[in-house]
């Protein structure tokens, strides 16, 4: 019986994890590297005037994430039916083609359409989350998802940094061709190296030992809400952060200081995500999520009263450490609240909920900051995180709690 459980995927789960790590990092770099030079490319494609350039830049950047949010549950369902490895092959090949085509855009409409196509064809990071969640042994699940999350966050951090240096060296259009070529390597690695357990695919797939035999709807609904609130809270600060930093430093240093402050939280999350995952494997994910959200909520309060940029940077770094790995913990809880044959569909819904938070957060933060001042945003965001902590602390999931 024990030998029967040692499937090919169980034997190769670490290799699967590191291939997904590299692929997720690469695709996230490809999706975000255009951020620093996007307004320049929009202007090159025919937009003129500050307001028009800003508008088309925002539309082009958001298009990818909007379409990705819409199709995430669909790709998850297809992965449940025909295989998660297949969805990763499709995503990496589709993104390599779509991003390369962006370099051939002739006007802003084509740019927006190709960015939307990238979101429709993409989904490598969310697909990786599903494959790793299903194929990794339960006792290592949260750690593996935390490690994978570090790769995703690192890609989001490195992408804009690389995008800021490359245009003078090789030209904007060549950057897209290079990005497509690099993602093609992720496509080849995915196709050749990942080993998937076929027993978890299809409507008749038997449930793995220890998994839920039916969908735990109350827990899933609660975790979807918590994931949305977490991303909403994270992104609600973004619109006002540069303005807030501007009140703490000399005007000539605003962009540098704001960039460092933004990077501090991301760096903290990258460092702590695998460790938070390992802790969740030991004491249970709900305790880690509730504790991390509570600590982050408390750290937000003094951010509204800092008098120097180094104070804000230190607090944002500590907040990143507290929040690192929470989304993978949510994914781990969701994954074990559904049978194998529905994991991709439900995790796709979880991804869509988090994308919704990325859209609502900046809008809410900008509105509150514009009407009541930047400092008020920190207090409001703290309350949002406390609500999320309360939702998690009152959740019941006896299957996953171990401590």
Image (tube, rainbow, N blue to C red):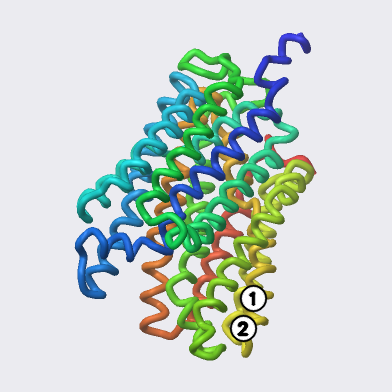
Q: Let me know if residue 382 appears in the view.
A: no
Numbered mark located on residue 313 in the image: 1
Instruction: Classify residue 92 as left or right of residue 139.
Output: left
Pointer 1: residues within 10 angstroms few (<14), some, or many (20+)?
many
Say which mark, if any, is on residue 352. Answer: none
Residue at image point 36% right, 36% down: 97
At horizontal 53% and vertical 43% (from top left) the residue drawn is 26
Question: What is the secondary structure assignment of the residue under circle 2?
Answer: helix
Quarter holding the C terminus is: top right
Provide residue 45's location: percent of width, then percent of height.
23, 58
Where does residue 221 sit, x and y in percent of width and height? 48, 44
Residue 177 lies, with reference to residue 316, above or below; the image says: above
Instruction: Confirm whether residue 346 shows in the render.
Output: yes
Snapshot quadrant of residue 332: top right
Rounded to the nearest angstrom, the CA distance separating label 2 from label 1 is 6 Å
Relative to 305, residue 24 above or below: above
Residue 255: % across, % down: 50, 78
Residue 49 is left or right of residue 135, and the answer is: left
Asked where in the image residue 366 lies, by quadrant, the reply is bottom left
Q: Are marks 2 and 1 in contact (CB under 8 Å)?
A: yes
- Could you say which is closer to the camera, residue 389 or residue 246? 246
The disc label shown at residue 309, or none: 2
């Amino acid at each position: 019986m024990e030998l029967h459980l040692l499937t090919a995927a169980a034997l190769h789960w670490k290799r699967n994890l590191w291939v997904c790590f590299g692929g997720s990092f690469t695709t996230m770099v490809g999706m975000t590297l255009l951020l620093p030079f996007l307004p320049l490319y929009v202007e090159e494609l025919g937009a003129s005037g500050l307001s028009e350039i800003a508008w088309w830049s925002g539309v082009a950047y958001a298009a990818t994430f909007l379409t990705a949010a819409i199709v995430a549950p669909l790709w998850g369902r297809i992965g449940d039916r025909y295989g998660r490895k297949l969805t990763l092959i499709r995503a990496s090949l589709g993104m390599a083609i779509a991003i390369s085509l962006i370099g051939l855009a002739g006007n802003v409409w084509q740019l927006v359409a190709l960015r939307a196509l990238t979101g429709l064809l993409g989904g490598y990071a969310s697909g990786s989350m599903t494959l790793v969640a299903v194929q990794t042994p339960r006792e290592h699940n949260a750690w593996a998802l935390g490690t994978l999350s570090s790769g995703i966050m690192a890609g989001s951090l490195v992408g804009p940094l690389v995008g800021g240096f490359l245009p003078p060296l090789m030209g904007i259009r060549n950057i897209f061709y290079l990005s497509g070529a690099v993602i093609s390597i992720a496509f080849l690695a995915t196709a050749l190296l990942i080993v998937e357990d076929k027993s978890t695919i299809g409507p008749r797939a038997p449930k793995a030992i220890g998994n839920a035999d039916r969908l735990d709807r109350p827990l899933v609904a609660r975790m979807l809400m918590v994931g949305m609130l977490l991303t909403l809270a994270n992104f609600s600060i973004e619109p006002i952060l540069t303005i807030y930093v501007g009140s703490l430093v000399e005007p000539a240093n605003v962009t540098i200081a704001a960039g460092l402050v933004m990077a501090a939280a991301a760096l903290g999350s990258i460092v702590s995500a695998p460790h938070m995952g390992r802790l969740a494997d030991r004491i249970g994910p709900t305790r880690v999520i509730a504790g991390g959200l509570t600590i982050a909520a408390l750290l937000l309060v003094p951010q509204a009263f800092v008098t120097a940029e180094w104070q804000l940077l230190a607090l944002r770094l500590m907040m990143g450490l507290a929040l690192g790995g929470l989304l993978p913990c949510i994914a781990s809880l969701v994954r074990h609240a559904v049978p194998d044959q529905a994991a991709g569909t439900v995790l796709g819904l979880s991804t869509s909920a988090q994308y919704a938070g990325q859209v609502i957060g900046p809008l809410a933060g900008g509105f509150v900051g514009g009407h009541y001042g930047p400092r008020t945003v920190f207090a409001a965001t703290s309350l949002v995180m406390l609500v999320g902590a309360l939702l998690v602390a009152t959740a019941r999931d006896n299957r996953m709690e171990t401590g």
